[in-house]
Image: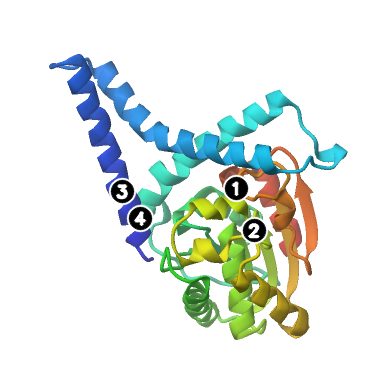
Amino acid sequence: MNGTIARSYLALLIALLALGAGSARLLAGSPVNPGVLLGAMLGAVLAPAAVAVALTYAISTGRATPPPPEFAIGRLALAAAMLRELAAHVIVFAVLVPFERVWMGRSVPLRASGDRDPVVLVHGYLCGAAAWWRFARLLEAGGFATRAVDVGPALGSIDDMADALARHVEEIVGAAGVQRVSLVAHSMGGLVCRAYLRRYGAARVGRLVTIGTPHDGTRVARLGIGTDARQMEPGSGWLAALAAHEAAATAARPQAVSIFSYHDNYIVPPASGALAWARHVPLAGFGHVETYFSTRVAALVAEALA
């Protein structure tokens, strides 16, 4: 496990909790009522997540074209999706990723499960392996052997992350005694997998499933920092070169499924979540980070893998 992202989020969490505690003391004086202190600390943690969710939904709802009628949802359903997305943000970035070693523990040896390849779970932009904690349990309950991996550097090139993924894949196939794995990726992780296939081919990959991946870029990437954010902008040269390579090198394309939501607050436009050469599974009412916890999405992934 690469603990750089985990340490960064842990440091941020501590800073936010300290800010909340300091604000409570400043405003309420000393001694501070424990309930006020706890509320201020929780508020400091919730505030960045609320800003991220509000901003991304403002962009996605303001710039997105209406979904097909069968995928339209009402205002109450959209509000519920926003609340679930807020909860998912807090759980991933304030509970799971900062304490990756607690949730993920030490890696256990992988073995192929029947005729099913081991499943390698690849996280998205500024995230970490621990985000897959519940999703991995859902797949394992269905009989899949899983390994969530960290790919980095966090703000570097997606191609460098593909090299990191290649090292994980070789380690896993060697330890498990198998010839190939299945790749399941969230968000930018799907682009990492495609970059891996461009550089290393599909010999080690039986299936690819992407969830909420900006295959054609996303306008939200313009808010991000780092080389990877620039590569995810719509119309980027990196995305164009990747698509051109895939069009010419069809042998490097495994069986693939792209799962995407018409109400994904980070993928703008939502249709960018559909990989041109994959089977598409469109959904309605799901936010971006929420899919890490969805039993429905996990069932769709299991179906695609099986």
Q: Earlier in the sequence, mark 4 or mark 1?
A: 4
Is residue 306 in view from this perspective? Answer: no
Q: CA distance from mark 3 to mark 1?
A: 23 Å
Is there CB contact under 8 Å for labels 1 and 2?
Answer: yes
Q: Residue at x 66, y 84 (%)?
A: 203
The figure's colour scheme reads: rainbow
Q: Which residue is mark 3?
A: 10
237 up-or-down from 63: above or below: below
Q: Residue at x 29, y 37 (%)?
A: 16
Q: Position of residue 190 (x, y in %)?
A: 62, 64
Left/right placement of residue 75 relative to residue 88 reads: right
Q: Which residue is mark 4?
A: 6
Q: CA distance from mark 3 to mark 4?
A: 6 Å
In the image as oriented, which residue stretches furthest toward the right?
Answer: 69
Q: CA distance from mark 1 to mark 2?
A: 9 Å
Q: CA distance from mark 2 to mark 3?
A: 27 Å
Q: Which residue is mark 1?
A: 266
Q: Amino acid at mark 2?
A: Pro
**Quarter of the image where one finds residue 283:** top right
Q: Earlier in the sequence, mark 2 or mark 3?
A: 3
Is there CB contact under 8 Å for labels 3 and 4?
Answer: yes
Q: Position of residue 18 (x, y in %)?
A: 23, 35
